[in-house]
Image (cartoon, rainbow, N blue to C red):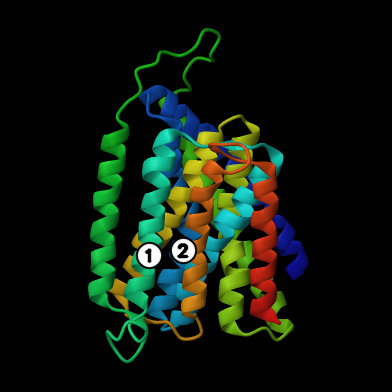
């Protein structure tokens, strides 16, 4: 039964990703907003809803391992697996603003998480934790960052190219976005519940489940929406989705979770946090290796190999 629910959940995720991508692209076209910004905001926050639900409920239940491990594992999965797979399908071009602004912002946010959560290592306290003050700071930074990013991007001035389809009706685009998000969230939860049940039958620890299975399950919406966006020729939206999701995961989701209930690191180590920083660093370096200003297929392979090695050392 769990396997059947796993398949049904995956089907809902894929359908939801398709609706969300089309609806979001229609919004971008109607409002003349760059697709990267739509990916960074609407799509990124929408596809991060499963992480939000899991981490907040875990924080309320006092399961800090799951709340933090879910976000840490999701951010690692987003870059190494999602961008790795996307790059294998089609190399991802990196714009000048992405290299100079968006990726560095993601790197700074990852470093901030490392500093805030490494109290014992930095001699700031006896236990590694994210307190309410840390959570409130992260939420304030998220709001400020979204305001800055949207304002910096501004509105595009280009007119639709000749032959471009007429803009979708606003109500239809809204229905597609809401319906797509519903499919992503419900399908993600269905997949997550059934996958977690299967993992526990195998006797896997809760912290490992959080970083691997829970994180992978809640990141399926990002995977599906990014792949669908790429196949539809919207690479900017796919890349913006991953970068925006990683930023939202740390500042919004962990910020809200820590504000509700302070989180202790537990089984999540500083090594795991360091790998999160590594994802941003390697993504930045892809702009200068192999095919310049692009995540190339070779880099996609490297990302997937690094992820496999990380998971191997985690579960062995």
Q: In the picture shown, does residue 91 fall above or below 135?
A: above
Q: Residue at x 70, y 86 (%)?
A: 203
Q: In the picture shown, does residue 245 fall above or below 41?
A: below
Crowdedness of circle 2 by 10 Å Cα count: few (<14), some, many (20+)? many
The x and y percentages for residue 59 are 40, 77
Q: Which residue is mark 1?
A: 111
Q: Is residue 200 left or right of residue 107?
A: right
- Is any atom of residue 16 visible in this view? no
Q: Residue at x 61, y 37 (%)?
A: 291
Q: In the picture shown, does residue 234 fall above or below 217?
A: above
Q: Residue at x 53, y 54 (%)?
A: 282
- Is any atom of residue 222 visible in this view? yes
Q: Which residue is mark 2?
A: 277
The x and y percentages for residue 256 are 32, 67
Q: Secondary structure at mark 2?
A: helix
Which of these two is toward me, 43 or 1? 43
Which of these two is toward me, 240 or 54? 240
């Amino acid at each position: 039964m769990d396997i059947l629910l796993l398949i049904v959940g995956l089907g809902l995720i894929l359908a939801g990703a398709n609706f969300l991508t089309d609806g979001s692209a229609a919004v971008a076209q109607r409002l003349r907003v760059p697709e990267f910004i739509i990916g960074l905001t609407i799509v990124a926050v929408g596809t991060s809803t499963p992480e939000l639900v899991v981490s907040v409920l875990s924080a309320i239940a006092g399961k800090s391992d799951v709340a933090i491990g879910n976000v840490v594992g999701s951010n690692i999965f987003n870059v190494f697996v999602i961008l790795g797979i996307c790059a294998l399908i089609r190399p991802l071009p990196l714009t000048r603003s992405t290299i100079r602004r968006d990726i560095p912002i993601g790197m700074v946010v990852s470093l901030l998480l490392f500093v805030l959560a490494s109290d014992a290592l930095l001699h700031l306290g006896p236990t590694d934790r994210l307190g309410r003050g840390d959570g409130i700071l992260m939420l304030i930074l998220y709001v400020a960052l979204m305001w800055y990013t949207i304002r910096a991007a501004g509105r595009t001035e280009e007119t639709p190219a000749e032959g471009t389809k007429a803009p979708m009706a606003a109500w239809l685009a809204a229905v597609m976005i809401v319906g797509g998000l519903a499919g992503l969230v419900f399908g993600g939860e269905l997949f997550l519940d059934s996958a977690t049940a299967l993992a526990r039958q195998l006797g896997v620890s809760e912290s490992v489940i959080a970083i691997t299975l829970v994180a992978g399950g809640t990141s399926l919406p990002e995977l599906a929406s990014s792949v669908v966006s790429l196949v539809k020729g919207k690479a900017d939206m796919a890349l913006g989705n991953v970068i925006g999701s990683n930023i939202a995961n740390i500042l919004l989701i962990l910020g809200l979770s820590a504000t509700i209930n302070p989180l202790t690191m537990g089984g999540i180590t500083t090594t795991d946090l360091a790998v999160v920083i590594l994802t941003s660093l390697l993504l930045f370096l892809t702009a200068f290796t192999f095919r310049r200003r692009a995540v190339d297929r070779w880099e996609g392979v490297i990302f997937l190999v690094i992820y496999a090695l990380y998971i191997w050392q985690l579960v062995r």
